[in-house]
Amino acid sequence: MLFLSVVINFFQRVSISAAIVPMTQSTAGAPYYDWTGYEKGIILSSFLWGYALSAVPAGLLAKRFGAKIVILSATGIGGIVAISYPLAATNGWETVVVLRVLTGIVQGAIYPCVHTLVAKWVPRTERGFLTTFIYAGSQFGSALIMVISGFVFESSMGWPGLFYITGGLSLAWALLYVWLGANEPATCRCISKGERMYIESLTGSSNNSQILTVPWMSILKSPAFLGLVAAHCGFNFGFYMLLTEMPTYMSSVLQLDVKSNAALSSLPYFVMGTLCFVVSPISDLLINRGTISVTTGRKLFNSIGQWVPMACLIGLGYMTAGETTEAIVLLTLGVGITAACCCGYLVNHVDLSPNFAGTMMGITNAVASLISILSPLMVGAILTDETDPTQWRVVFFVTSGVYLICNTLFVVIGKAEVQPWNDVPSISTTNPST
């Protein structure tokens, strides 16, 4: 259910990136709008405004009221918002921006809730694989929506159909999760006693973690946490730049039609999702056998996931319309290999503090989202001519520099050991028996 939640919520995120091409082309066979590159940049970046705003409060709400009700509400509300996009577009791009902000607000709750549930449900011996499996939904969701979009755009529904499908699936998932979801093994109605004891003994999350006081200053001053923030920022900046701009790049520079654009735009995310299931067992195997430490494993795989794409983007900067195959290969490799980050920074929150993994994800997500807002705005500022490969080269070089700096910080100061402030009662409580 968590995997499907991530898939469907990425439908909500990515649908506008795929749809904005036919929405602004008069040949698409559906209503179209003459939005400028600047206006499209605002639309694509506005999601992150709301996303950054809600990430930290969502983590706190998940701890206070339980992650189930928060993720359920966020997905359902997001579905209603998705269905509203076609009507909003008729009222101008500003109205679409408002809905994108609302989508960002509800989406900001997803990762903190998932991390809160992961801390309660995923045994540490399987943390790399199962966490990667859940978050692989982001890649499969991105890929599926790109593939589906090509067929939907050419159907009688046109681009509005993409939003109706997204909204319907979101509401269906929310209804199903009312019955199947549970905050923790202790409250699950379809679990054996043996399975419950096994999971609780290997999660490292305190049974009363929902009432622990968050050690804000200890978290924010922790070098290990700051390294994690840097890694998350690097991933988000590159991921959202490619996610939001790849369809435009393929259409304007590689000169692919709408259907080919949709299919090829999805390919890197299918590769990324597949590689998630390759790198995560390798990571768990190396760590569980003692071949490498947890800290070394997190840094190694995060470096693969950010520095290889950095090299690919540098090469992509020199591609032209006559080198479509080479450009697709670099895009596919560059996006696909970021799957290694699932065994790097993405699981590191739980490494540092099982009790506050959701809250920490909220913080890093908020900061990374604020940085990511700059990504489509940067593209909009640089690209005065979307067909000019030399301007795209500048975009790719800037993104490569962000990858280099952020992952270097993670390698230098990052850690993957439970921090002293995770066990708040032993540090701050006034009751020795607690």
Image: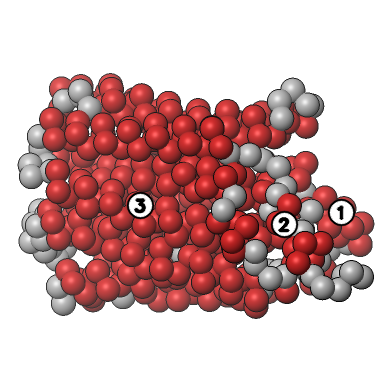
Label 1, residues with CA under 10 Å away: few <14, some 14-19, many ≥20 = few
Q: Are marks 1 and 2 in contact (CB under 8 Å)?
A: no
Q: Would residue 302 be visible to someone looking at this image?
A: yes
Q: Residue at 53% across / 61% down in the picture?
A: 362
Residue tagged 1: 201
Q: Nearer the viewer, mark 3 or mark 1?
A: 3
Give the quadrant of residue 325. top left
Near-viewer residue (90 or 352): 352
Q: Residue at 43% across / 28% down in the picture?
A: 307
Q: Residue at 43% across / 38% down in the picture?
A: 406
Measured as percent of width and height from the top left, residue 116 is found at: 65, 62
Check disc 3 and give the amino acid type: Ile
Q: Which mark is residue 371?
A: 3
Q: How far apart, in angstroms, are the residues tagged by discs 1 and 2?
A: 17 Å
Label 2, residues with CA under 10 Å away: few <14, some 14-19, many ≥20 = many
Sequence-first tag of 2 and 3 = 3
Residue tagged 2: 422
Sequence-first tag of 1 and 2 = 1
Q: Are marks 2 and 3 in contact (CB under 8 Å)?
A: no
For label 2, the SS is helix
Horizontal relation, residue 393 to residue 244: left or right: left
Check disc 1 and give the amino acid type: Ser
Q: What colour scheme governs how the chains and residues are painted in the rendered image of this protein? A: secondary structure
